[in-house]
Image: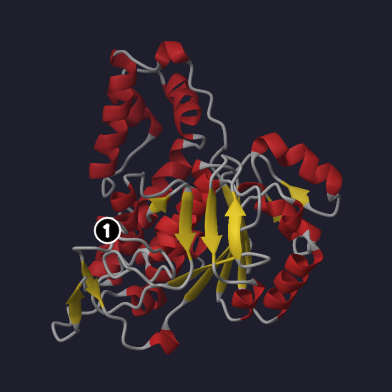
Amino acid sequence: MAVSSGWLTAGRSGMSRGGARLHGVSGPDAPGNGRIAVVQQDSANTPTVALLVADGLSPFEFAAAAEASGYDRGGPGRVWYTTTVAAPRPGIVGTDLGFGIEARHGLGALSSAGTIVVCPAAGADATGEPVLQALRRAHRRGARIVSLCTGAFTLAAAGLLDGRRATTHWGHADALALSYPTVEVDAGVLYIDDGDILTSAGSAASIDLCLHIVRTDFGAEVAAAVARSMVVPPHRDGGQAQFIDRPVVLATGPDVDRFAETLAWALEHLDEALSVDLLARRSAMSPRTFARRFRSATGTTPHRWLVRQRVLLAQRLLETTDAPVDLVASRSGFGSATNLRHHFRRVVHTGPSAYRRTFRRPPPDHGRERVVR
């Protein structure tokens, strides 16, 4: 996206990067120039995302959502999102850092979007009645509604979080709970996926939720490719703690090196029997110290981390190979297809075979039209 004279432009011009469909990023220095872009032929089947912004916008979370959904990294055979930027009134939207973006779409863009991402904003427009009504209408027709950071206040004001578990930045969690007592506020997680409503904690947790959505829509392999492009970890579990206490005294030194090496080793040996005792010995720690250090460093337990990593490996194998489910179970460390199905369904909410039918990567389509911009 190009910044010119202090304004970042977002509207309809449709400049692309790597096949991007981020509507309205304009300017001679836009990042699509000189890149190969895949032409999307069938717009009727394109999943649509609307980024809702308002005055007082926090640009970090907006940029995270735009980066994850706006630039096409789906590869051959997949139709990526078409992303638009909408505001209560089209025009310049001020950020809390003193610059602005131009949103050329009004709230009408929310009427057809499959996913609406409510970006955090401090201005009164963010919880104005026109915004709240537009979100209620979108939710009634079945749109997926996402809030990033304090965008949860907008969802709560619309009544969309009533009786639901939701999260926001830990520094604003008490205010959310006090202002909206019907919302079950959980300040201890990175994000919450409640099906049609998803909420994230602040800043980097917005990236985690955006990658989770890409993973849900396109599979683990595509989400990992998006994460690599964004130069961030491919997955942090939504239940991980927002704030992880990592003492400075332990931030460097051979013990931390051994701990990091142990985690890297475990990722390369997920098909083997891995116990806390084994991992602790490799880290030169007692099992109790290792478990305590593990939770301090990752925000979760060794068992939960291992299960999640094995499920992620199984997802990639199901997406990229024709290996039978029994073999996928063995390669991912679950031992049996029954054990794989149990953990896979608990984490992914579907079975391995159904997941493969949805996300199995199609063969390259060498006939797709390409254009150099």
Q: Nearer the viewer, residue 117 or 314?
A: 117
Going by the image, does 299 lie left or right of 46? right
Q: Position of residue 350 (x, y in %)?
A: 48, 71
Q: What residue is disc 1 on?
A: 330
Q: Is residue 313 left or right of residue 213?
A: left
**Above or below for 228 versus 108:** above
Q: Is residue 316 found left or right of 204 in the rendered image?
A: left
Q: How many marks?
A: 1
Question: Disc 1 residue type?
Answer: Ser
Question: Could one spot residue 323 in this view of the protein?
Answer: no
> In the displayed structure, would residue 12 be above or below residue 332?
below
Q: Which residue occupies 45% across, 23% down?
A: 293
The quarter holding residue 86 reads: bottom right
Is 170 rendered above or below residue 323? Answer: above
Q: Residue at 40% across / 56% down in the picture? A: 67
Q: Whole-percent x and y of residue 101?
A: 52, 55
Question: Where is residue 362 drawn, in percent x and y?
Answer: 24, 79
Q: Residue at x 33, y 16 (%)?
A: 255
**5 or 216: which is nearer to us?**
5
State which quadrant residue 45 falls in.
Answer: bottom left
Residue sitting at 51 percent across and 35 percent down? 299
Residue 191 falls left or right of residue 369 = right
Q: Is residue 72 visible?
A: yes
Which residue is most to the left? 366
> In the image shown, does 265 or 180 lie closer to the viewer?
180
Protein image colouring: secondary structure
Direction top: furthest residue: 249
Q: Quadrant of the N terminus?
A: bottom left
